[in-house]
Amino acid sequence: EYKQQEIVLNFKSTLLEDKIILIHVLVIAPIVEEIIFRGYMYRILKSRTPIIFAMIISSTIFSLIHYNVLSYILLFVLSIFLTYIYERNGSIICPIIIHSLFNLMMSTLIIYGN
């Protein structure tokens, strides 16, 4: 049995009381994480390694910072997809929007799921 992430437990217990958490999850986190992982880390790695290695390394780190073995694969695949979208469009805006929508979907599942 794996425990839920501490942030998920806190989020679930305080969301209805504290709307600031929702703003953080849906707006601030996607912006900051995309700037760090796609806009900065991936770009640097891409300039020094083949694109596929840059995608794998930045996506692995992105997944690991969330500290949950259960969500690792899902976050890794999400990160690869976000990096692909970033590479395809050349803009950080699309990955930010998709990341935010992903967090909205996960938040909804956390609140209303079993």
Image (cartoon, rainbow, N blue to C red):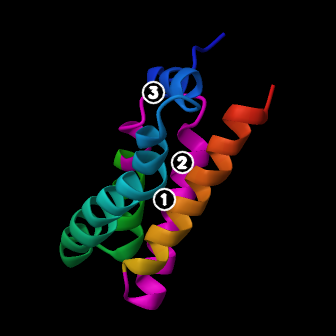
Disc 1 designates what residue? Answer: 79
Q: CA distance from mark 3 to mark 2?
A: 15 Å
Magenta stretch: helix, strand or loop mostly:
helix
Residue at coordinates 61% horizontally, 14% vertically from top-left? 2
Disc 2 target residue: 75
Q: Residues within 10 Å of mark 3 (few under 14, many from 20)?
A: few
**Quarter where residue 1 is shown:** top right
113 or 87, which is in the foreground?
Answer: 113
Q: Residue 29, relative to residue 55: is it above or below? A: above
Residue corresponding to mark 3? 7
Q: Residue furthest top?
A: 1
Start and end of the magenta stretch? Answer: 62-91
- For residue 32, side relative to residue 47 (left or right): right
Q: Is residue 86 magenta?
A: yes
Q: Residue at x 73, y 39 (%)?
A: 109
- The answer to whether marks 1 and 2 mark residues whose Cβ atoms lie closer than 8 Å is yes
